[in-house]
Image: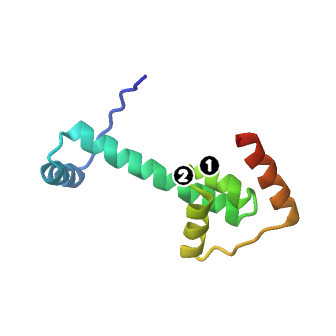
């Protein structure tokens, strides 16, 4: 299933899209879908890291929310200077989640 989304953009953004289309040799719809997918993926990582840094989710759960591996989430957290915090309760929750995924 697909959904049509339309929006107004500034002239500057339209010029930027035209340049990307030219470089990527792709039509506008393809470029917008690609950029939107990349932006949504980045937002998911940012949101998951925010929840983790606030102690609302474990690192494992943050990785699941961001749709990345635990290792990737650990690297992202380290790159952004987010302190690693892991309790016995977090371990229990993560193990329970991991076992459910099998």
Q: Is residue 67 left or right of residue 25?
A: right
Q: Residue at x 15, y 54 (%)?
A: 23
Q: Is residue 39 left or right of residue 6?
A: right
Q: What residue lies at 75% left-to-right and 71% top-to-bottom? A: 85
- Tag 1–tag 2 contact (CB < 8 Å): yes
Residue in view at x 72 percent, y 64 percent: 54
Task: Return the residue at label 1.
Answer: 65
Quarter-of-image position of residue 70: bottom right
**Residue at the front extreme of this rendering:** 102
Q: CA distance from mark 1 to mark 2?
A: 7 Å
- Position of residue 88 relative to residue 60, above or below, is below
Residue 50, above or below 32: below
Give residue 93's position: percent from left, percent from top: 82, 53
Lower sequence index among marks 1 and 2: 2
Q: Quadrant of residue 59?
A: bottom right
Lateral position of residue 67 relative to residue 7, left or right: right
Which residue: 47% across, 51% down?
41
Taking depth in this image into account, of 21 and 99 the one nearest to the observer is 99
* Tag 1 secondary structure: helix
What residue did someone put label 2 on?
44
């Amino acid at each position: 299933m697909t959904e049509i989304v339309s929006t107004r953009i500034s002239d500057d953004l339209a010029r930027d899209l035209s340049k990307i289309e030219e470089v990527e040799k792709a039509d506008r719809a393809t470029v917008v879908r690609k950029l939107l997918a990349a932006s949504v993926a980045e937002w998911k990582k940012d949101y998951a890291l925010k929840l983790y840094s606030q102690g609302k989710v474990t690192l494992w759960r943050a990785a699941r929310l961001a749709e990345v591996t635990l290792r990737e989430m650990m690297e992202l957290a380290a790159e952004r200077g987010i302190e690693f915090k892991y309790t016995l309760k977090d371990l229990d929750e993560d193990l329970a989640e991991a076992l459910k995924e099998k």
